[in-house]
Image (cartoon, rainbow, N blue to C red):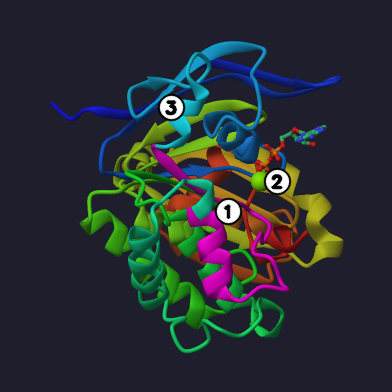
């Protein structure tokens, strides 16, 4: 039986009138890479902050590495590393100095510390730049240093909050390689992300969080399979988006249409099979005078899973807000 590395039960967190978490139940297995997916403000960072003992829930319980984090926060802290959403490295210090500072926080002895610092600088390809102040680094280099800082005490569990936010494609690919490498070393990775491709590529299992609740959890394949069938996506010019609701209504009465979901100027139509459904769907659009600017059809992806459970579509624009 796989053992559980992180478990939460009924976590509730309020900030004044805002209920950030409204009963979060999660289970992450040892050695797996787990993705928490959700739109902005869904409660991802709040969940992580509780798990790393930086925030206290109003209700619920949580264990990390078998330790009750509410009863024994100090003991739990030794078991995990954390890479926050915002950059944390001190810009006036060099990478080596930053890593030494983190090593000091974990009371590593001098020889362990120097060994770890060298190892991590190599791991994230910063050995050459190690003695330059961080303020001279690119965004990607800073992020890689943050990752190294989170790994300084060789934790068995690592929390990564949106690790590739704002990184270019090349650095993202590097980062993904490091994360996959951690898995090889048996590290349990808890990753918050807005990027569906990242979740698909890296995560053994994912959970979709929306408005402080877990909407669904499973392997990416399980979640995709649960949607079943194919999806046809129609896009109107923005000025014509008002006509989509009527079209969605008409389509949903057809026997081969399982579900429709309108989102702005896009309409997703879940059908048994594209080949037979597409002509009929277009017929309906044309009969109703709906202008179609773009048509796409595919098997559902994680982004469709996300849309179904949150009612939002994650795209590049939303991520940059
Ligand atoms: N310190 C705080 N004070 C007040 N409200 C907060 C605080 N931290 C979070 N919230 C609120 O709690 C909710 C959840 O926020 P959280 O940061 O967990 O979202 P998130 O899923 O990490 O979003 P993002 O993708 O934007 O990082 C939001 O409504 C947010 O405004
Ligand atoms: Mg966040």
In the image, is 259 to the left or to the right of 109? right
Q: Regarding mark 1 in the picture, which secondary structure is present there?
A: loop
Kindly identify which numbered label has been placed on residue 87: none
Upstream in sequence: badge 3 or badge 2: 2
Upstream in sequence: badge 3 or badge 1: 3
In the image, is 318 to the left or to the right of 167? right
Residue 63, given in percent of the width and then of the height, sits at 41, 22
Q: Is residue 288 magenta?
A: no
Q: Nearer the viewer, mark 3 or mark 1?
A: 3
**Any atom of ligand 1 within 8 Å of the CB at mark 2?**
yes
For disc 2, the marked residue is 40
Residue 152, given in percent of the width and then of the height, sits at 43, 56
Upstream in sequence: badge 1 or badge 2: 2
Q: Are marks 1 and 2 in contact (CB under 8 Å)?
A: yes
The residues bearing labels 1 and 2 have C-alpha atoms spaced at a distance of 8 Å
Rendered view: 102 above or below 204 = below
Q: Nearer the viewer, mark 3 or mark 2?
A: 3
The residues bearing labels 3 and 2 have C-alpha atoms spaced at a distance of 31 Å
For disc 3, the marked residue is 75
Q: Regarding mark 2 in the picture, which secondary structure is present there?
A: loop
Q: Residues within 10 Å of mark 1 (few under 14, many from 20)?
A: many
Kindly identify which numbered label has been placed on residue 194: 1
Rendered view: 30 above or below 193 = above
Choose top left, top right, bottom left or bottom right for residue 283.
Answer: bottom right
Asked whether 155 or 41 is in front, the reply is 155
Q: Is residue 201 visible?
A: no
Q: Residue at x 72, y 40 (%)?
A: 41
Q: Residues within 10 Å of mark 3 (few under 14, many from 20)?
A: few
In the image, is 5 to the left or to the right of 241? left
Q: Quadrant of the C terminus?
A: bottom right
């Amino acid at each position: 039986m796989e053992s559980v590395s992180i478990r939460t039960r009924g976590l509730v967190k309020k900030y004044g009138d805002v209920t950030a978490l409204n009963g979060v139940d999660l289970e992450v297995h040892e050695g797996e890479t787990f993705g928490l997916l959700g739109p902005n403000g869904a409660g991802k960072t709040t969940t992580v902050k509780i798990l790393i003992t930086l925030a206290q829930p109003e209700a619920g319980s949580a264990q990390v590495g078998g330790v009750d984090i509410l009863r024994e926060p100090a003991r739990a802290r030794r078991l995990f590393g954390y890479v926050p959403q915002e950059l944390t490295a001190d810009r006036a210090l060099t990478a080596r100095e930053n890593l030494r500072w983190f090593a000091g926080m974990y009371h590593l002895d001098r020889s362990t510390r120097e060994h770890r610092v060298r190892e991590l600088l190599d791991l994230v390809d910063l050995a050459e730049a190690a003695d330059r102040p961080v303020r001279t680094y690119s965004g990607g280099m800073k992020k890689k240093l943050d990752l190294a800082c989170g790994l300084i005490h060789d934790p068995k569990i690592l929390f990564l909050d949106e690790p590739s936010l704002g990184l270019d494609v090349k650095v993202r690919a590097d980062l993904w390689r490091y994360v996959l490498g951690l898995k090889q070393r048996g590290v349990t990775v808890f990753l918050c992300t807005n990027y569906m491709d990242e979740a698909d590529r890296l995560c053994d299992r994912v959970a979709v969080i929306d408005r402080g609740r877990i909407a669904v959890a499973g392997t990416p394949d399980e979640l995709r399979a649960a949607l079943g069938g194919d999806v046809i996506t129609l896009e109107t010019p923005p000025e014509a988006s008002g006509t989509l609701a009527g079209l969605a209504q008409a389509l949903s009465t057809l026997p081969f249409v399982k579900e429709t979901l309108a989102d702005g100027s896009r309409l997703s139509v879940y059908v048994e099979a594209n080949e037979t459904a597409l002509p009929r769907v277009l017929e309906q659009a044309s009969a109703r005078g709906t202008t179609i600017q773009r048509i796409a059809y595919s098997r559902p992806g994680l982004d469709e899973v996300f849309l179904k459970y949150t009612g939002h579509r994650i795209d590049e624009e939303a991520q940059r807000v």
